[in-house]
Image: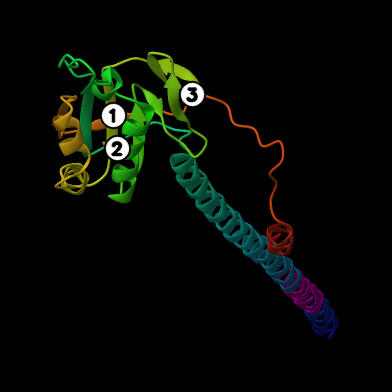
Amino acid sequence: MLANKHAKIMLVLVFAVLGFMLATQIKTTERQKTINVQRAEELTERLRVVEQQRDDLAKEIEKLQANNSSDKVLENELERLKEFAGEIPLEGKGIQLILDDSKVTAQVGENPNLYIIHDDDLLRVINELRAAGAEAISINGERLVSTSEIRCAGPTLSVNNNRSAPPYVILAIGNPSNLASALKLRGGVLDTFKFWGIQAELTMPEVVKIPAFKGRRTFEYAQAAEEHQETAKEGK
């Protein structure tokens, strides 16, 4: 009888221990589940933050690329304007015309000035070349721009306020055939030079190189028109 009683007590103790262990295991599992859920939520939040940062960076990259593209357009436009203004040297196909005074001796009673090159002779050549589509022109290394002058200066000529003496080497970039044809027109400039014995040598080099304008230009009286200023403000 006593043995049965001890057995029952031991059995109760065993069940009690098992119950405690089971309860502890359940609590541990539940706590682990809670930790896992919290961890998952934490990782989800981190992922959301990283994705937001990624999107922000992508937008910033797009903005920078757009700005860079705009800057590139402005740089290209600036280079194009510099070309037209003569601020940078150019090269390309074109023609070379070398002019020198006539070797013919003026007859008695003739005006000897008819046998030498004058400013109006060069101006006629320049006008013909420009009308034929010349994109850049130089005379004895002086780039012609909108403010360039060609005028007599005693026995020499002044180009860009620099004296030049014959022979005059005129370079022009453009369609070589068109430029040459403009000078060779019947009754044109070359025919006139030939009549007075002015020496003229016309060639078409493979590459014509024209230097940049060497002088300085300042606008003391001219300024941008008001309508242009308003348009520029609206574009900003």
The mark that comes first in sequence, 1 or 3, is: 1
Q: Nearer the viewer, residue 79 or 227?
A: 227
Q: Could you say which quadrant of the image residue 17 lies in? A: bottom right
Would you say residue 211 is visible in this rendering?
A: no
Q: Nearer the viewer, mark 1 or mark 3?
A: 1
Q: Classify 117 as above or below 27.
A: above
Indicate which disc residue 125 carries: 2
| Residue type, numbered disc 2 | Val
* Residue 11 is one of the magenta-drawn residues: no
Front of the two marks 1 and 2: 2
Q: Quadrant of the N terminus?
A: bottom right
Residue at mark 3: 214
Left of 16 or right of it: where is 51? Answer: left
Q: Residue at x 78, y 72 (%)?
A: 31
Q: In the rendered structure, which segment of residues is drawn in magenta?
A: 17-36
| Amino acid at the residue labelled 1 | Ile
Residue at x-position 50% and y-position 21%: 161
